[in-house]
Structure formats: C-alpha cells, structure tokens
Amino acid sequence: MESQDAPDALEAQRGFICASFNQDTTSLSVGTKTGYRLFSVTAVDKLDCIHEGVECPDVYIVERLFSSSLVVVVSLSMPRRMNVYHFKKGTEICNYSYSNNILSVRLNRQRLVVCLEESVYIHNIKDMKLLKTLLNTPMNPSGLCALSVNHSNSYLAYPGSASIGEITVYDANNLSTLTLIQAHDSPLAALTFNASGSKLASASEKGTVIRVFSVPEGQKLFEFRRGMKRYVSISSLSFSADAQFLCASSNTETVHIFKLEQHSPSQEEESPTWSAYVGKMFTAASTYLPSQVSDMMHQDRAFATVRLNMFGLKNICALATIQKLPRLLVASSDGLLYIYNVDPQDGGECVLVQKHMLFDSSEEQVEQIEEDKLEDVSPQPPSQSYAATVALPSTPPSSTTLMGYSEDGGAQKGEVIPEHEFAEGPVCLDDENEFPPVGNQSN
C-alpha cells in the first residue's frame, strides 16, 4: 500500500499517507505528513514505536530491511529522490535521484529495486551500486512489483503488459529474465512472493480471482475466487511464513484468507459421502463445459474471512505468528492497526483481539477508540536517452569508491565496504552485531 494518491479527508486528518510491513512481518512502517514511524508488531497487547523520523515531511514510501537499521524513504516534496538512512544513528547512508517519480521500492538482503512508471532500477544493497536498468518496461502507473524475500534467488515480478495480466519474472541476482506468466485477462493489480520465492500470487484489476504460480516454472498451482458479485480493487496480497495461507485485502469491508492445499483423490475415495459424490459429478461435468465455466467450478473459496468496520479505505494485510499463535494484521488509513486471531484448523470468521492507534489523538478520540474496543473485542484465550534515465547519486562519490555503510561508521561518503567482507554471502542486517566491520580508508 505505497500510494501516491492524494490522501482523502480522513487520511489527511490523521496524517496517514502510506504503510508497509517489513519482510518477516515483525515491523510496520507508516509514512506521515511529518515524516515516518516504525513500529514493532511482535506482541498483541502493545505496539511499540521504535523510531520516528522527521528528516523529511510527506513520506509516501517507507521500507525497512527486516529488523535492521536500514530504512528507505521517499517524500512527496522530492518524489524523484530515494534516501537511505541508518535510522538508529540518525545518518544518511546515501541518496539516489531518478528521471521520474519513484512509485515503489522493494528490498531484500541482496538487492534494492526502485520502480518508476516505465523503468526498473536494480541496486546491489551492500554498496548501493546500480547494477541494472530495465528501460521501456510496460506502463506501470502504480509501480506494481514484488521482490522475493529470499536473497538467494532475488526473484523480481512486475507487469509484462499494460493491457493484460502478464507477469515478467526476473532474476535480480543473475540479471536475466526467467519467464513470462499469462496470469489474467485484465491488467495486474497485486503481486507477492512467498518467503522462499517458490510461489507467486497475483490478482487483476477485476479482483475476483487470485491465482498462485510456481516459480520459476510459471505453472498455475491454485486458483481462488474472492467473489462474484462485484469487481474490487485488491490492495494487498500476503503469504503466511509457511506458505500454507494467503490473505487478500481490498477496498471492501472483507479480508479473505485462502488455504493452499491440494485435494487428494485417495482421501475422496476413502470417504464416499454425498458431498464427495456431488463434487466428483461437478468435476466430471466441468470437462464438457466452456473453459471459463470449468475454471470457476475448480476455484476454491476463502478458508477464513475478516469483516472490517470500514469500506473504501486503503489498507494492507499480513499473516504473522505473534506470541506463538497465527494472527492477521490489517493496517488501515483510518490510522489503526487491527489484530485478529486465525483458526488454522477450521477457519471461519476471524475474531478481533486488539487494535492499536498509529497516531497521536486527542483525549476524546482516545476515549472513543477505547469504547469501540470494548464493544468489538470479546475475551479470547491465550522516452529519454539512456544517459538521461540512469539513476545517479545526488552527491557523486569518488570514481574509485562507493558510498558504503557500516555499523561502526554509519554513513560515510567515499568509504567502501571491502569485497572480502561479503565472500561468504550477502550482508546480514537482522541484528545490530551482524553489520560487517569496515576499516578506515582514505580516498
């Protein structure tokens, strides 16, 4: 939900502009009119604000790398510039400027991807060096793209067409195109990888069907029907950590959770119930029907649902395990984070267990939130030249060095992280002690 649209009246009142969860759903980043905020979402009953950044106002993109101190920020005041901060030290690692407005940013431990309307830039995250520029990509006004969290593959997905739902899957490590997936008849609206990068989920602008494909083969694995009565705008898709569940939120009041399970023929033989018999008859009949009807009959419905007390507001959802239980998190532009319990066995209607305010409010608003909480929550058990389009640092470093970053030195222009520090693999940024040491070097 990295939106560049002007906030509506409620969002403007609350200062809300955008929100995103980090790669392992342990942190929530929120862009505001005054800057940005980072929250820890590892507990149900409390929401800790880790950091509040005021380096620039009107932040419409904010992405944190796992639980590290690295955060990427883009502001409405300078929409063509990406700022990378070490927020705990209060220092800027680097900044890059582009030929057009930045629409989205994605990152893992190996790559940082910047998406513009008709181009994609791939950076090496250890030194922020630009590795590849994908020019003249299909028109992508929302900056839709997805990057796998698993840095060993670093798969990148983005629209392969502006008129139909074609997905380009790109290997951001080896810098080559892997495959094209014909996912939908209508243009794409949402994309997401599972944690290992072996599955890719997609939804079109119609928002009625969600499909899951294998990566890199591009074979369709699952097809879920969100609804038939109306077209909706899917705002987010998110897998659970084990890829057993997939949640989808939209501009409607319902969040859907789908279960990724293959129906075993042997199990159907062992339980010759009336429903199993009818199911077989429908399956057999579908082979004689038009493909559109046949596809509909093979689609699975939602395993679990959430009914939000809102309609038409922007929101993002994520599945996480918090305090050893599966939860659904929904961050909404009404300035609240909602936490629901999910029954992994029986599904059904998820129960709201907590909601947290993301912004400071007056005492009256606080009292109203508390009253709503008591009512809602029941007790629960525990076309330019290439030169014009290439991204260049706003402050060019020395021709022999790159701007690096380290835990000890923070952001130091002209200081480069030695290559031998990465011989064993990509830089790890989960923990403060995992930043590679950088010796003092002169230009």
Image: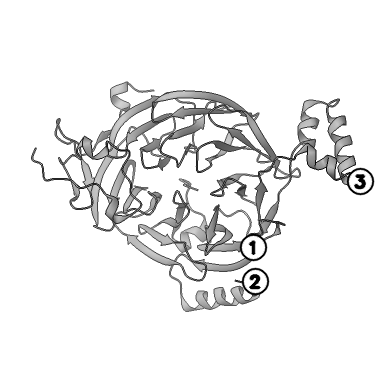
Considering only vertical position in the picture, is 4 above or below 211? below
Along the line of sight, which residue is nearer the eye, 250 or 438? 438
What distance separates the C-alpha of mark 2 from that of mark 3? 39 Å
Mark 1 residue type? Asn
User: Residue at (70%, 40%) from the top-left corner?
Assistant: 262
Amino acid type shown at disc 2: Asp
Q: Nearer the viewer, residue 302 or 275?
A: 275
Question: Which quarter of the figure has residue 57?
Answer: bottom left
Q: Say whether marks 2 and 1 touch (CB < 8 Å).
A: yes
Mark nearer the viewer, 1 or 3: 3
Q: Whole-percent x and y of residue 119?
A: 41, 29
In the drawing, what numbered circle is on residue 133? none
Mark 2 lies on residue:
376
**Count of marks, rendered view:** 3
Q: What is the secondary structure assignment of the residue under circle 1? A: loop
Disc nearer the start of the sequence (2/1): 1
Classed neighbour count for the residue bearing mark 1: other residues with Cα under 10 Å, few (<14), some (14–19), many (≥20): few
Report the side of 377 relative to 290 (left or right). left
User: CA–CA distance between discs 2 and 1?
Assistant: 10 Å
- Residue for badge 1: 309
